[in-house]
């Protein structure tokens, strides 16, 4: 079997060497080139035709944002942004995702040896996961796609609602998928949402601010003890676990805690969705979007066990069909839909 070819684009010789060592620790991955700036990255992508590109943001001559846009226009290739774990790095990363990058990974690679190993494993998993998307990206470029239609809403009145809260979970490819859904929800919707996506602490606040600027619903990062308001969207903060708790017949609030301390993900989607299922039995909805692994599966199982509703993103529209696949294979999805139709499905099921 041929190796997955990777191009590394970074203006730091140290970073290029470290990233190369990480990638080539997997015998099925091969670094076919290393570019010193965005211009070289574009030229080498066209020449070497890699399966995946890792892209720095701040570089001379041509930065990573411009290089990403040019690559996606000339020779669409799965791109992973290598980002600094800061608010500024988060904003630049989301801009890169808007320009066509598929995923990102933190650039803080010089902490403890354990952190380096964790980042190495994450980078390898992400390269393997998105490499399969190259053929689809190229095929999509040759097809002139019509403008995305506004989801069709059968339901037009929210005076009575079967669903009192919606929990959404995602990972790889999640930021764009969540943006697609929330930006198409109508302002008349009074149902609150809680959103969990695998992101570092510095990213979730910036992500919430970005969503708030694009949506008619109010979006913010969740705070400990915060009451749940009608029509609000709360983004689970990175670095802690978000649980929805009940303190009255119709009064719910957010609880942020560090436990379990050994959790792989913070936020863990299973923890959040399970708390929603238990706080609102029979009146909750779980939505699982693109991502690696199976986080969210047990939460969706609890939603179904308590009489709630579930939606899973379909394989064709996923960046990585891992988390939704686990839900679908377990027979827990009431609806399986492409990302552009999920906003409509949520509204109609509420």
Image: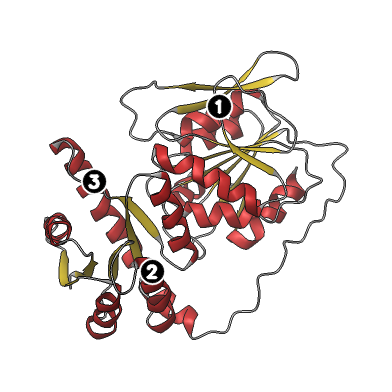
- State the residue at coordinates (49%, 23%): 256
Label 1: state its secondary structure: loop
Label 3 or label 2, whichever lies nearer to me, is 3
- Picture quarter with the N terminus: bottom left
The residue carrying mark 1 is 223
- Alpha carbon of mark 3 to alpha carbon of mark 2: how far? 22 Å
Label 3: state its secondary structure: helix
Label 1 close to label 3 by CB (< 8 Å): no
- Picture quarter with the C terminus: top right
The residue carrying mark 3 is 119
The answer to which of 92 and 236 lies nearer the viewer is 92
Q: 144 left or right of 45? A: right
Quarter of the figure with residue 162: top right
Position of residue 202 relative to residue 31, above or below, is above
Residue 311 position in % (x across, y down):
60, 48
Q: Is residue 1 visible?
A: no
First of labels 1, 2 by sequence position: 2
Position of residue 227 relative to residue 91, above or below, is above
First of labels 1, 3 by sequence position: 3
Residue 92 position in % (x across, y down):
43, 57
Label 2: state its secondary structure: loop
Label 1 or label 2, whichever lies nearer to me, is 1
- State the residue at coordinates (34%, 29%): 263
The residue carrying mark 2 is 133
Disc 2 residue crowd, few under 14, some 14–19, many 20+, Cα 10 Å:
many
First of labels 3, 2 by sequence position: 3
| Count of numbered marks | 3
Label 1 or label 3, whichever lies nearer to me, is 1
Q: 103 left or right of 178? A: left
Which colour assignment does the render follow? Answer: secondary structure
Residue 267 position in % (x across, y down):
44, 34
């Amino acid at each position: 079997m041929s190796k997955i070819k990777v191009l590394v684009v970074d203006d730091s010789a140290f970073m290029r060497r470290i990233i190369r060592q990480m990638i080539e620790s997997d015998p099925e991955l091969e670094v076919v080139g290393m570019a010193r700036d965005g211009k070289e990255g574009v030229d080498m992508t066209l020449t070497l035709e890699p399966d995946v590109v890792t892209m720095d943001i701040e570089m001379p001559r041509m930065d990573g944002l411009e290089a990403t846009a040019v690559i996606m226009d000339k020779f669409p290739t799965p791109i992973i942004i290598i980002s600094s774990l800061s608010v500024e790095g988060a904003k630049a990363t989301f801009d890169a995702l808007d320009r066509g990058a598929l995923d990102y990974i933190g650039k803080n690679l010089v902490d403890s040896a354990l952190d380096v190993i964790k980042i190495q494993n994450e980078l390898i998993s992400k390269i393997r996961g998105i490499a399969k998307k190259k053929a689809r990206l190229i095929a999509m470029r040759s097809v002139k796609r019509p403008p995305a239609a506004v989801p069709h809403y059968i339901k037009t009145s929210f005076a009575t609602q079967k669903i009192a809260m919606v929990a959404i979970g995602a990972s790889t490819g999640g930021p764009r998928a969540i943006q697609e859904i929330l930006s198409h929800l109508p302002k008349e919707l009074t149902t609150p949402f809680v959103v969990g996506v695998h992101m570092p602490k510095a990213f979730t606040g910036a992500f919430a601010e970005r969503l708030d600027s694009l949506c008619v619903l109010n979006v913010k990062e969740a705070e400990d003890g915060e009451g749940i308001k009608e029509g609000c969207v709360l983004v689970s903060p990175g670095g802690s676990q978000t649980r929805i708790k009940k303190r009255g017949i119709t009064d719910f609030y957010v609880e942020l805690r560090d436990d379990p301390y050994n959790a792989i993900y913070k936020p863990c989607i299973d923890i959040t969705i399970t708390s929603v299922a238990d706080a609102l039995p029979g009146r909750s909805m779980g939505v699982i979007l693109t991502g690696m692994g199976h986080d969210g599966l047990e939460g969706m199982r609890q939603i179904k066990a308590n009489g709630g509703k579930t939606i899973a993103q379909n394989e064709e529209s996923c960046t990585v069909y891992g988390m939704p696949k686990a839900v679908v294979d377990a027979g827990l999805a009431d609806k399986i839909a492409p990302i552009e139709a999920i906003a409509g499905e949520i509204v109609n099921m509420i």
